[in-house]
Image (cartoon, rainbow, N blue to C red):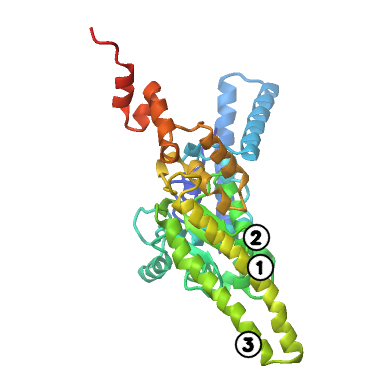
Amino acid sequence: MRQAPRSDCKESEVTLDFIAPPSFQDGLSKVKLRHAELSDIEREIDDEVYRLYGISHEDRQAIEQELAEQVLAEIDLGVNDESVLNENVSIAQVSHDLTENELAKQWISYSVGIVMGRFLPGIKDALGCGNYSGESSIRLLQLSDSDGVLVADKGHPKDFTARIAEALHILLGEEVVAEAIFKVTGRNGGYEESLGHYLEHSFFREHIQKYRKRPVYWYFQSPKKKYGVWAFHERLTKDSLFRIRSEYVQPKIRLLEGQIADIPKRANASEGKEKRRLEREMVPLHDTLDDVREFERRLKYISEGRDGTQGYTPHIDDGVLLNMAPLWELIPSWQAEPKKAWEELKAGKYDWSYQAMGYWPDRVREKCRANKSYAIAHGLLDLYEEHNRGPKK
């Protein structure tokens, strides 16, 4: 597999060398020129290698066709090995002709990383450090949430969309933001509204694809998707779900209850079209309230312990999917794969993991008695040695 040039790695957020996306103003032309120059160099090297080894034109065509099919298959099917997400990103994935739409999405995704606390603009050698003045970097860092939790709730102090829009203002400038969002959404009108629509309906799906089904940011939603919370999974703790309930979801429930209680009073004081309009508001508000209440119930159920097991505790060493597995009911936009992983956890497929030990300690400890690798993984080598110690002579 060919390697991506270092300049591409610095501009691709799935690599460990990432600094910032290509410039929105002239990045397209610079990337195109760089790739053209690289292609010329690679072609010269290939020509010389084939000449030295005496490979015929027909054999060369067959070899290059096979390699091209292999790369396409990897892109289509995805590669689950997270080690791919570093220097070893294939050049076919990061070096294709960049479009205005893709470049705009890169800047939105970069802004998401900043507000979620993953990228640290202005911090030397940090991931996504960018190239910004002191004032700009300070303003960007102030938008970062220390807990890595923001809500999809317009008007909330921690409104996900509003934070990203503000970050884009700082990164690109006021005039360019509307253009960038239009390149992504194709929607005229208020660009923050268009941005919110994209984030709610498309960003998470694209993010999952970008990170090969191992998303960095998780989108928790109510069952009918009427309310959502974004979380940076590396910042999750055993208290995060409780805090999401108490600091975001429960206040939202109280707000909705207050709005519903207020409508009859306002309707009684109104007449005609205004009264009918207020009465029509009751149904969607009740639907939203029921949905958010169910979301709160699921958060409580998972955080405090399901099916007689412990409450949810993330273990970053288990990897993204196994940490998402116990939360599958909170992720209606991408439920099948985490749910499958949860069923496999219950069945004992991943008893080497901390999640398995946390939920089914008796079963895992019993396996550690007979399986040395499991015993080492869980720090129970003494249990294995005691079980397998021969009889005293």
Which residue ends up furthest to the front in the rendered image? 308
Q: Are marks 2 and 1 in contact (CB under 8 Å)?
A: yes
Of marks 2 and 1, which one's residue comes earlier in the chain?
2
Q: Quadrant of residue 42?
A: top right
Asked whether residue 163 appears in the rendered view, the answer is no
Q: Secondary structure at mark 1?
A: helix
Q: Nearer the viewer, residue 251 or 172?
A: 251
Instruction: Give the percent coordinates (x, y) of residue 311.
Output: 43, 49
Give the residue at mark 1.
Answer: 287
Give the residue at mark 2.
Answer: 224
How far apart are the two marked residues, 3 and 1, measured between alpha carbons?
20 Å
Give the residue at mark 3.
Answer: 265
341, above or below 202, in the image: above
Q: Nearer the viewer, residue 238 or 111?
A: 238
The quadrant of the image that shows the N terminus is top right
Instruction: Give the percent coordinates (x, y) of residue 249.
Output: 51, 66
Instruction: Give the percent coordinates (x, y) of residue 205.
Output: 62, 52
Query: What residue is rendered at 52% in x and 54% in y?
Result: 218
Which label lies toward us, 3 or 1? 3
How far apart are the two marked residues, 2 and 1, measured between alpha carbons?
9 Å
18, above or below 248, in the image: above
